[in-house]
Image (spheres, grey):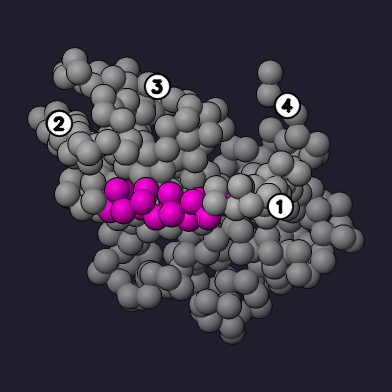
Amino acid sequence: MQKREKIFLYNVLNQEVIFEEYFCNLLIIDNFRNLFLKFIKSKNKIFDNFNISYENFNTEVILDEEYGRADLFLKVGSEEFIFEIKNKDRTSLTDNQPNGYLEYLNKKYKNHNKHLFFLVPKAYKHLQEINDNWKNFDDIESQIFYWQDFVIEIKKSKLNENCVEIDMFYQFCLYWFNMRVVKFTEEEKDLLHPKEKSMNNFNKTIPTLMRKLENIIDDVGQNSKMKKCNNCIGLNYSITINDYIIYFGIDYDIWEKDGIPLNIVIQNHAKNYGKFELKFSNIKLMEIEYPETSSTDDAFGYVVILNEELGSEYYQHTAIKTLDKIITQLKA
């Protein structure tokens, strides 16, 4: 049984709709709202001449029926701004994110990309899709903001020390976005700073090992016609085919749990989830689940078990050949 975390909002703000509602509710607090607006202004000056109050914000606003539903919506006078909120690394984008939003805003504003913002985790897997859909517009970086950066601003402001509602949100974010202070066991400290000479060589092999893994990832990724991920942690190369995304690289959760350092991971993004089967009998799949996701997010994925051991002379060749088979099948 999973150990319960000692935070008030444990298993409460996991779902994005609830997360965005709680966040919007916090904007009623003047200092918190001012901190958030200052955070946005740090990269984008579009709000400089506006007087924005809590009443200007709303959530789950329908955009003329055909353009989707805005997570967080800000209206000041005749000006409208959309904030798309993601609090999970793997949550898929809908057709309206950002295309429908941009079409809606394009009806009203010439530089409509300046009226759409994304609030996402730093390891969000679909940043490349956002960039690809936004390729006709300039300065995408001034429209993308990361929750981890805002959490740091909360800490600097010390607002959480004087307001229990803010502190509950702050503590949840530390847990949810893996921002809590990392504590090492005594055994781990000995590995990092070995006192015995015999362990010193082991300590020095860690960066050598990681560099070799990175070289393998680049070799396989580049020869499989995959794209290098932006802001990915470990999973360095990917390709999207229909409702699937294939990753190749390091998934630290899989490495820690199953002892597989390099992974081919297949994620299913279909609305109607079904079991994935490869036509090739010599390729083995291990199903993995993402328990933090809801029924509308990525439900499950697969790890491909290669029949060639990592470190062997033919590992890269086997990985490239396997990826080619998977990609060919999914494109058929």
Q: Which residue is mark 1?
A: 195
Q: Which residue is mark 3?
A: 287
Residue type of the residue flagged with mark 4? Lys
C-alpha distance separating marks 1 and 2: 48 Å
State which tag comes first along the sequence, 1 or 4: 4
C-alpha distance separating marks 1 and 3: 41 Å
State which tag comes first along the sequence, 4 or 3: 4
Q: Given contact means CB atoms under 8 Å apart, are the residues at marks 1 and 3 in contact?
A: no
Q: Given contact means CB atoms under 8 Å apart, are the residues at marks 2 and 4 in contact?
A: no
How many marks do you count on the picture?
4
Q: Is residue 61 visible?
A: no
Q: Which residue is mark 2?
A: 325
Q: Nearer the viewer, residue 87 or 73?
A: 87
Where is residue 77 drawn, in percent x and y? Answer: 56, 73
State which tag comes first along the sequence, 2 or 3: 3
Q: Which residue is mark 4?
A: 3
Q: Nearer the viewer, residue 162 or 321?
A: 321
C-alpha distance separating marks 4 and 3: 23 Å
Q: Is residue 273 left or right of residue 185?
A: left
Q: Is residue 147 above or below residue 248?
A: below
C-alpha distance separating marks 1 and 4: 34 Å
Q: Is residue 320 above or below residue 96?
A: above
- Bin the neighbour count of mark 2 within 10 Å (Cα to Cα): few under 14, some 14-19, many 20 and up: some
C-alpha distance separating marks 2 and 3: 19 Å
Residue type of the residue flagged with mark 1? Lys
Residue type of the residue flagged with mark 3? Glu
Where is residue 227 drawn, in percent x and y? Answer: 25, 53
Which range is magenta? 203-218
Q: Give SS at disc 2.
A: helix
